[in-house]
C-alpha cells in the first residue's frame, strides 16, 4: 500500500499480521517489558519491518528504540518513519542525502469518533473536507485528515525537535491523491512552502505519507 505513495529512494516494508518469534534488539526489550501483549506485538513487528527496510539500504540489523516523544532512533544518516494500526504495520526509511525527513501513517478507514473532528480540524479544513466529500463520497475525510496530520508531525519533529499541535497545520486535499500542509509555526528547518504528501484508501485502510526533499544546491555545491 505504501509502495505506491513513496519515491523510489525510500525502502518500505509492510505486513498485515504479526509473525511469531520476532527478536528485539538492545534497549528495545526493556522498553516493552511491562507492555500488554498487543502493544508488545505492535512494537516488535514494526521494528522487524524497519530492520528489513534498512537492510534494503545495506544497514543493520540495529536496535531502533523509542527516543524523545516516542520518535524512533534511527541509525546515523538515516531518516525514517513507522506506523501501525489494527491488522497493519509498516516502516519506511531513506538516506538523509535523498530525503531530509519522512512521515508515514496508516489508519483503519472508519469515521472518527464523535467529537474528535472538532478537536483536530479548523473551520477551513472542515469546509474543505465537505468539498472533498462531494468529489469522493467513498472517502472518510475526517480520518484522512487525522492520518495526514500524523504524517506531517512525524516529518516535522525530527527537523525541529518541537511539538506540533493539530491546530498548527492547515491541510488541503486533492482528489488526485495529493495534499499540502501549511505549517503555522515558522522554523528555519522546515520548507517555507510547508509540506506536501500523498494519500490513498485501499483494503479498509487509509494511508498518508509526507516526504521532505534535501535542500537544493547552487552551482558549486553550496546549499541554499
Image (tube, grey):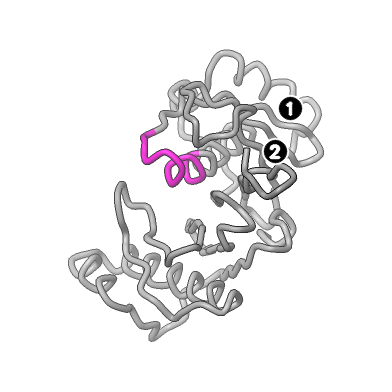
- The C terminus lies in which quarter of the figure? top right
Question: Where is 147 relative to 121, above or below?
Answer: below
- The residue lying furthest to the bottom in this view is 21
State the residue at coordinates (64%, 33%): 141
Residue 172 numbered tag: none
Question: Which label is found at residue 139?
Answer: 2
Determine whether 19 is above or below 153 in the image. Answer: below
Q: Earlier in the sequence, mark 1 or mark 2?
A: 1
Q: Relative to residue 192, is residue 217 drawn left or right?
A: right
Question: Is residue 48 or residue 189 the one in the foreground?
Answer: 189
Residue beneath the point at 66% across and 24% down: 129
> Residue 36, located in which quarter of the rendered image?
bottom left
**Magenta residues: mostly which secondary structure?**
helix
The CA distance from mark 1 to mark 2 is 8 Å
- The residue that label 1 is drawn on is 132
Q: Nearer the viewer, residue 98 or 123?
A: 98
10 Å neighbourhood of mark 1: few (<14), some, or many (≥20)? some
Asked if the stretch drawn in magenta spans residue 155, the answer is: yes
What kind of element bears circle 1? helix
Relative to 122, say whether 111 is above or below.
Answer: below
Q: Is residue 208 visible?
A: no
Q: Which residues are magenta?
A: 153-163
- The quadrant of the rendering that contains the N terminus is bottom right
Magenta span includes 85: no
At mark 2, the secondary structure is: loop
| Location of residue 118 with respect to 141 vertically, above or below | above
Q: Position of residue 46 (x, y in %)?
A: 45, 67
Q: Position of residue 212 (x, y in %)?
A: 61, 45
Q: Position of residue 180 (x, y in %)?
A: 67, 32
Q: Verify CB contact (< 8 Å) between mark 1 and mark 2.
A: yes
* Towards the viewer: 109 or 94: 94
Query: Which residue is painted at 42% across and 67% down in the image?
Result: 75
Amino acid at each position: 500500500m505504501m509502495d505506491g505513495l513513496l519515491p523510489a529512494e525510500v525502502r518500505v516494508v509492510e505486513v498485515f499480521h504479526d509473525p511469531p518469534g520476532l527478536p528485539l534488539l538492545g534497549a528495545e526489550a526493556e522498553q516493552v517489558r511491562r507492555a500488554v501483549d498487543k502493544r508488545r506485538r505492535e512494537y516488535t513487528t514494526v521494528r522487524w519491518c524497519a530492520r528489513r527496510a534498512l537492510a534494503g539500504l545495506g544497514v543493520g540489523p540495529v536496535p531502533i528504540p523509542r527516543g524523545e516523544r516516542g520518535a524512533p532512533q534511527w541509525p546515523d544518516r538515516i531518516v525514517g518513519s513507522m506506523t501501525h494500526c489494527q491488522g497493519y504495520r509498516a516502516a519506511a526509511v531513506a538516506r538523509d542525502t535523498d530525503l531530509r525527513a519522512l512521515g508515514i501513517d496508516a489508519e483503519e478507514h472508519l469515521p472518527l469518533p464523535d467529537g474528535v473532528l472538532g478537536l483536530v480540524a479548523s473551520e477551513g479544513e472542515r469546509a474543505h473536507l465537505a468539498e472533498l466529500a462531494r468529489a469522493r463520497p467513498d472517502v472518510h475525510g475526517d480520518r484522512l485528515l487525522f492520518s495526514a496530520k500524523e504524517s506531517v508531525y512525524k516529518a516535522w519533529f525530527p527537523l525541529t525537535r518541537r511539538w506540533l499541535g493539530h491546530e498548527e497545520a492547515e491541510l488541503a486535499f486533492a482528489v488526485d491523491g495529493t495534499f499540502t500542509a501549511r505549517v503555522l509555526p515558522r522554523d528555519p528547518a522546515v520548507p517555507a512552502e510547508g509540506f506536501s504528501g500523498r494519500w490513498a484508501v485501499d483494503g479498509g485502510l487509509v494511508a498518508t505519507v509526507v516526504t521532505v526533499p534535501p535542500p537544493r544546491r547552487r552551482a558549486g555545491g553550496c546549499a541554499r
